[in-house]
Amino acid sequence: MTHDAPRLLACGDTAFTIEFGAGIDPAHSARVLALDAALRARPLPGLRETVPTYRSLTIHLDPLAADPEALGRTVLALAAEPLPPPATTRLWRIPVVYGGEFGIDLDAVAAHHGIAPEAVIERHAVPEYRVAMIGFLPGYAYLEGLDPGLALSRRPHPRPVTPAGTISIGGAQALVASIAAPSGWHLLGRTPFRNFVPERDPVFLLRPGDRVRFVPTPAEDWGALAAAAEAGETVAEVSDP
């Protein structure tokens, strides 16, 4: 298999980005996560933090402890090696109440694709997704693996506010939202699962590379699950590797 040659992009004097290609591509994402794992396994002097995205890895560094040019060359050389894929990752089973007040765009998405709302739920819940990145806002988990038959351009007019825990789709992406925020994505459901809690350790539960399955959940179960989440329970099943 051939790959695009990665390139370095300067981000001031305290960071640089290594980019593996253009657009959303599982192959690019796999290379990003493999390099991220390799850097965490053998941290380099002056390297502070790595931030993976769909197609790039941003590397934050201490300019007083590292030579940015030398560190960049080292990272490029490491990226050129045949890196092993990351070890088996955790699988999260996240409860989702679909449709109605919890997923106000479910019927519209179904109508757009000419299928029943129940078929949208089934197609959305069947895949095993992978967390490609955490971004935009704290704890927002962007997922790879959406059924191509559900792909849909974002709404032409974003909503000023959507609820925390929204489960939505936009283009070929799926999302687990963490906090209330504006969004132009299509809202299929909602989960009481809280990926981002500032007072919790760890603050974030989902990590890039983790796998996710959505579990359709009756609306009448929402109250108990939401109360449990408020009390600090995870309300999602997780299988460690």
Image: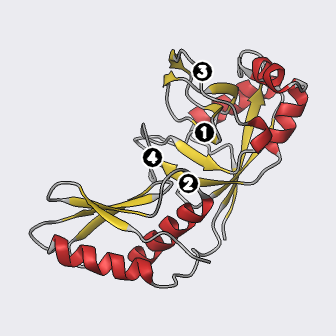
Q: Nearer the viewer, residue 130 or 16?
A: 16
Q: Amino acid at mark 1?
A: Leu
Mark toward the viewer: 3 or 4:
3
Q: Circle 3: is it few (<14), some (14-19), or many (20+) Cα within 10 Å?
A: few
Looking at marks 2 and 4 on the same chain, the residue that comes earlier in the sequence is marked by: 2
The answer for how far apart the CA atoms under marks 2 and 4 are is 23 Å
Q: Nearer the viewer, residue 199 or 151?
A: 151
SS class of the residue under badge 4? loop
Whether residue 152 is visible: yes
The answer for how far apart the CA atoms under marks 3 and 4 are is 34 Å
Task: Name the residue that disc number 3 marks.
Answer: 155
Task: Name the residue that disc number 2 marks.
Answer: 132
In contact (CB < 8 Å): disc 1 and disc 3:
no
Question: x%, y% of residue 211?
Answer: 66, 57
In contact (CB < 8 Å): disc 3 and disc 4:
no
Looking at marks 2 and 1 on the same chain, the residue that comes earlier in the sequence is marked by: 2
On screen, 44 above or below 183?
below
Q: Name the side, left or right, on which 107 lies relative to 21.
A: right
Q: Residue at x 56, y 35 (%)?
A: 177
In contact (CB < 8 Å): disc 2 and disc 4:
no
On screen, 71 above or below 211?
below
Task: Name the residue that disc number 1 marks.
Answer: 175
| Residue farthest along the left direction in this orientation | 64
Q: Which mark is residue 200?
A: 4
Mark toward the viewer: 2 or 4:
2
Q: Amino acid at mark 4?
A: Arg
- Quarter of the picture containing the N terminus is bottom right
Q: Name the side, left or right, on which 181 lies relative to 101.
A: left
Q: Nearer the viewer, residue 166 or 15?
A: 15
SS class of the residue under badge 2? strand
SS class of the residue under badge 3? loop
Looking at marks 3 and 2 on the same chain, the residue that comes earlier in the sequence is marked by: 2
